[in-house]
Amino acid sequence: MKNRTFRLRWLVVGVIGLALCALPAVAEKLHYPVAKKVDHVDTYFGVKVADPYRWLEDENSAETAEWVQQENKVTFGYLEKIPYRAEVKDRLEKLYNYPKYTAPSRRGEYYFFSKNDGLQNQSVLYIQKGLTGTPEVFIDPNALSKDGTVRLGAFSVSKDAKYAAYGLSSGGSDWQEYHVMEVATKKPLADDLKWIKSSGVAWQGEGFYYSRYDAPEKGKELTFKNENQRVYYHKIGTTQAEDQLIYQDPANPQRFNNAQTSEDQRFLILSVSERGKGKDGNALFYRDLSKGQKDFTPIVAEISNDRYHVVDDVNGKLLVETTHKAPNGRVFLFDPANPAEQNWKDVISEKPEPLEGVSSVGGKLFVTYLKDVTTRAYVYSRDGKLENEIKFPGLGSAGGFGGRKDDTMVFYTFSSFNFPPTIYRYDIATQKSSVFRAPEIPGFKPTDYEVKQVFYRSKDGTQVPMFLVYKKGLQLNGRNPALLYGYGGFNITTSPNFNSLRLALLEQGFVYASANMRGGGEYGEKWHHAGMKLEKQNVFDDFIAAAEYLITNKYTSVEHLAMNGASNGGLLVGAVLNQRPDLFKVAVPQVGVMDMLRFQKFTIGWNWIADYGSSDNPEEFKAIYKYSPLQNIGDGAKYPATLITTADHDDRVVPAHSFKYAATLQAKNTSENPILIRIDTRSGHGASNTTKTIEQTADIYSFVFYNLGITPKY
């Protein structure tokens, strides 16, 4: 869950061709599968908690498989009767069918970038010599599986550009298998490394460092607790069995141990974190390989809530980004010859705005900050002198700024809700940006849509930002359909972003609202900590207040309001659904953490204790038990129309969360509204390919349209 590459921002908004109608005959009474109840009770610090659907945690049992099959039969039977479902899917395909690129990165004489022609299941990785060379296919994941669910994960090229290491995952799993290819010949080598998760590739000489786990027992991948991560060194041309063990810590099995090397490969850096014990930061160690050091020397020996990350090696000293004594972030210079903290020299001091990222390229530091959830970028000298600001075409999100010390240019991508991701090339010498590649989306006009940022007061008076997106000409009459999205956790910022699939809702008159609740990274660590552990209720209060703002200001009304969130955002929707079922007409919780008393029992779940706390702690149990979606479903309560989504290969938030939640909600809901669960196959924590993305989105949109009484006109 703590994965920055990992940000699931779903659903949509707009204003056009709106037709309201009475619900047609599909709204017949549904007959849900009978889910047996077992007499299972857990006791937490004297509190007895029933868990009648515990058997649904066994994903390998015949009973669970039968229940899944029957639930999908009900769900897809309902969806198939929505008369415009196929039309919605067709519209989504048209909106998504345009070329999508990533910014290029350079290694030696080669540039690498990814491209999706439009509806390819996976993006294809290309290679070319220089920026004017002819692109050639380097890795095409679409050719590696019949169902298009094999995808490219990690990718890293050796310093001499001789080899490329890359990771592949299948069916939506977080597990990756690493392989190696010769760059010049594109010849795959025999190197095959398995059971890799939460790891990078750190090149050094004729090989690289990486982190792996032991193999889980076959058939038990969703209950394997991902413990005892070790760091290995793999030499090209050898087997995984021959890999050299670099670091392990069997006394602390739930620690993440990750390696990186400095660009000049002089330093091997080891980052150690232990979120399973509630610590949000990491310890940091190094080896000076130029001196033949065999043991790791601490920069920071103990794990706390402070985070540390090495940015660069500057003449034998290390530039380190940290939140230590700076909740908004700062950068200091660490001298191995004078390691004491009092000798740490600030290069970039903490500012009122949170530090979003730092990279070292072409002898400069590229630093991004967040100002009211939008990106600001600056260029500094390596000794911390501000040289200039990189201006963007508007308020939005920017990322990239990666490169090497000998690069003369840097690439970045800028986007916003009505500004498709556009790649820019920044010339370091002239300090000028120019468009390198801009997408062309047929029929889309940014000027047709308005993006507005508002600030509203939460229950305790805290001011919370929210973005609103809708088609120009919106009338504040309280009758506009609206979709409220939120995440609110893990220091992740819900940034302004573009999603062409949203247009399918915007075209139909929706207001899309993206609330930036506490728990995220929008205003630094203070904002994050105000929405975690014992303060988690603040996140739900912020979301409820966002809905009330939309209604009070006549953007929408209860009868026209839907809510959506995924992963931690699925937890958000589940908790708010229990606390304010009267506030929404439709709810779509996706891959949510619904059983907050047992999340730490599965796969990587213990990693979230740093944000949630744990039911194993008496004080944290009391807080969690009050809002856990599964345990707070009300007897006899009337719930809105709800579509729960999950997938059989989700080894991050295991599907048992959604299984138990759906069974309980179906049993206790007393309204006539549908309570459905859509269980995807060969997919994981998010759709595993383009086909599944469009199919899932079409079903979600159709469900939302139908239960808000809208017949879309495209």
Image: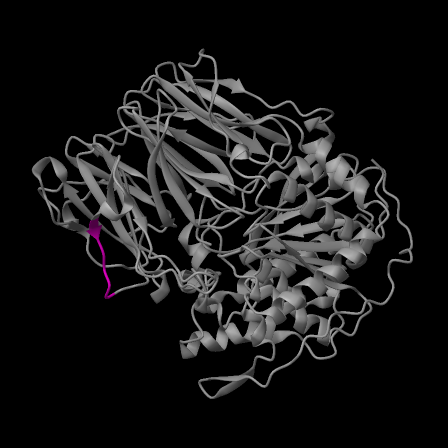
Q: Is residue 280 left or right of residue 508?
A: left
Q: In the rendered view, tell whether residue 478 sits above or below residue 181.
A: below
Quarter of the view holding residue 626? bottom right
On the rendered structure, is 532 left or right of 387?
Answer: right
Direction from residue 126 to residue 202 in the image, left or right: left
Whether residue 156 can be seen here:
yes
Vertical placement of residue 178 versus 251, above or below? above
On the image, the x and y values in percent for residue 111 come to 40, 21
Identify the image quadrant of the C terminus: top right
Q: Which residue lies furthest to the bottom in this view?
A: 46
- Residue 163, horizontal then vertical, whole percent: 31, 28
**Is residue 22 within the magenta segment?**
no
Depth order, front residue of 568/78: 78
Q: Quick check: 162 above or below 247?
A: above
**Where is residue 528, by image quadrant?**
bottom left
Q: What stretch is highlighted in magenta?
A: 245-251
Q: Position of residue 361 (x, y in %)?
A: 32, 26
